[in-house]
Image (spheres, rainbow, N blue to C red):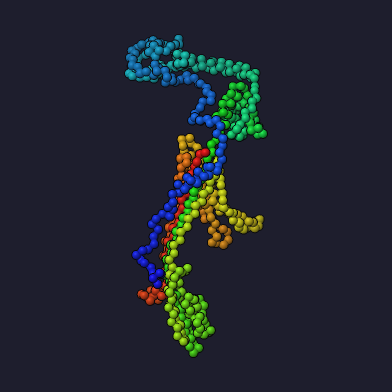
């Protein structure tokens, strides 16, 4: 029994991690092998992309605010006007700001004001507000005009009407400007993508949307045909050169490491007996019974469930001892069984996939389990997926990092129950920033299950010492650990 004895001073305990290998080191070696076998695009002429590049510009004049680059009109000034003519005050402000100031004939009156360390433009506006006058500011032409609001509004309305007439004249002249049709060959983006981008760029917003160009997709030669004026075609050419560029490829590898450790210890007993004399028979009825067959060598035999009175043997027992006492008319046996086992298992799954920047990619390996379902239309066969699946969209940042939108599933079938199949789910869905070539953990699960159980014959099992022959004990300690690593590599 020494091999079955339980040492209470050395109880089993999961006190070390199950996953001890350097997964990062193993992963780097595996990633390098995959890179060598993966696609190797021709480099050609590499063009370093800048974060921002000007394609076209349109300057808009500001008639209300003075830009910061005109320092003389932003300088702090101090003055004290005492009942001074308004026109003279404005002429004096023009000399300080080194800008021409014209004052309309309708402007009149005197002004008193004192300001200390106020920016020139703020002081100028304050003097206008005091007399309820308005100004037309054209600092690019070094000119400011001061009028009453009514006069200035009338002038602006005239200018707007005149500008509309001139614009219409220009549009009529533009309508006779030559219209060209040019074909732009594409290499990396599709004609549909190019058309959507260019059309949105040129389409004006508002009630009457309008586009000065017409874009046609040509799929056979992977091109777009653009019809419009030469200046618009020049902008299209610049846009195409910037967006139709070679996209980098990315290798994404996942390492799903599963480890489990199962410890079980059990101690059980079995008591059996049989008595037969003068037609009287007494014996255990657990398992099988000798019954009317009479006394024989098989009655209450060791290692057999025949004529068992109480049976608390350890399931899956690995050792045991029995005591058998036999007479001419009776037999009595006692068996003690023991079990102690430790099992460890480890699984490393390594899905890998190549994709291009900003394009989603999916890889799946597993099975679809069929099951029957009933609906109003009758019986039907449906399927449930139980698979190892990875869906990822990489985004190369440009600073040595890769932004990943990733989803990993490691689903397995649970066939313990009849009927519709159950699925054991394991899913990680996340977004994260990972350095190019690095291997990081994106998630994991650790589960430790402890179980202590006891079975005994009611009443008798509680008797000290003797009660051990009528009980069984078991202890289990199960630990499951799972880690998911991800490794992006820009090619």
Q: Residue at x 53, y 48 (%)?
A: 351
Foreground residue among 291 and 40: 40
Count up the numbered dots.
0
Classify 117 as above or below 417: above
Q: Give the x, y percent position of residue 154.
A: 51, 15
Classify 453 as above or below 283: above
Classify 402 as above or below 255: above
Q: Residue at x 63, y 19 (%)?
A: 177
Classify 281 as above or below 469: below
Foreground residue among 320 and 82: 320
Q: Give the x, y percent position of residue 70.
A: 42, 18
Q: Residue at x 65, y 57 (%)?
A: 378
**Quadrant location, the N terminus:** bottom left
The answer to whether any part of residue 332 appears in the image is yes
Q: Identify the image quadrant of residue 130.
A: top left
The answer to whether any part of residue 193 appears in the image is no
Foreground residue among 83 and 46: 46
Q: Give the x, y percent position of residue 169.
A: 61, 16
Q: Give the x, y percent position of residue 433.
A: 46, 41
The residue lying furthest to the bottom in this view is 278
Q: Residue at x 55, y 34 (%)?
A: 43
């Amino acid at each position: 029994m020494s091999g079955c004895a339980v040492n209470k001073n050395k109880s089993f305990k999961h006190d070390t991690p199950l996953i001890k290998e350097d997964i990062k080191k193993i992963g780097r070696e595996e990633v390098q092998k995959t890179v060598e076998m993966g696609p190797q695009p021709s480099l050609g002429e590499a063009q370093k992309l800048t974060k921002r590049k000007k394609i076209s510009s349109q300057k808009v004049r500001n008639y209300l605010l003075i830009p910061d680059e005109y320092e003389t009109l932003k300088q702090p000034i101090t003055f004290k006007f005492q009942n001074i003519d308004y026109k003279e005050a404005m002429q004096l402000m023009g000399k300080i700001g080194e800008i021409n100031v014209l004052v309309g004939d309708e402007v009149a009156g005197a002004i008193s004001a004192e300001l200390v360390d106020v920016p020139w433009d703020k002081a100028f506006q304050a003097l206008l507000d005091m007399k309820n006058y308005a100004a037309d500011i054209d600092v690019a032409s070094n000119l400011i005009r001061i009028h009453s609001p009514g006069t200035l509004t009338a002038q602006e309305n005239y200018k707007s009407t005149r500008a509309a007439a001139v614009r219409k004249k220009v549009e009529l002249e533009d309508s006779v400007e030559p219209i060209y049709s040019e074909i732009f060959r594409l290499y990396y983006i599709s004609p549909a993508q190019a058309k959507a981008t260019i059309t949105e760029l040129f389409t004006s917003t508002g009630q009457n949307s309008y586009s000065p160009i017409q874009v046609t997709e040509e799929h056979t030669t992977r091109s777009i045909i653009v019809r419009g004026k030469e200046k618009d075609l020049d902008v299209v050419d610049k846009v195409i050169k910037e967006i139709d560029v070679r996209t980098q490829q990315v290798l994404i590898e996942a390492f799903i490491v599963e480890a489990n450790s199962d410890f079980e210890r059990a101690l059980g007993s079995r008591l059996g007996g049989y008595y037969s004399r003068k037609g009287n028979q007494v014996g255990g009825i657990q398992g099988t019974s000798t019954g009317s067959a009479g006394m024989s060598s098989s009655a209450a035999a060791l290692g057999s469930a025949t004529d068992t009175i109480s049976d608390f043997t350890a399931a899956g027992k690995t050792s045991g001892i029995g005591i058998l006492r036999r007479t001419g008319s009776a037999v009595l046996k006692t068996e003690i069984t023991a079990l102690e086992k430790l099992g460890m298992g480890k699984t490393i799954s390594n899905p890998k996939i190549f994709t291009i920047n900003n394009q989603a990619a999916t890889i799946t390996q597993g099975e679809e389990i069929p099951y029957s379902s009933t609906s109003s239309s009758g019986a039907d066969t449906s399927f449930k997926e139980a698979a190892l699946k990875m869906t990822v969209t990489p985004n190369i940042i440009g600073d040595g990092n890769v932004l990943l939108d990733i989803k990993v599933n490691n689903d397995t079938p649970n066939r313990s129950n009849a009927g519709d199949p159950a699925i054991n789910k394991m899913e990680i869905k996340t977004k994260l920033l990972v350095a190019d070539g690095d291997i990081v953990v994106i998630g994991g699960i650790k589960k430790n299950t402890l179980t202590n159980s006891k079975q005994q014959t009611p009443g008798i099992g509680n008797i000290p010492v003797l009660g051990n022959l009528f009980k069984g004990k078991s202890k289990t300690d199960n630990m499951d650990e799972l880690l998911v690593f991800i490794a992006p590599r820009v090619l």
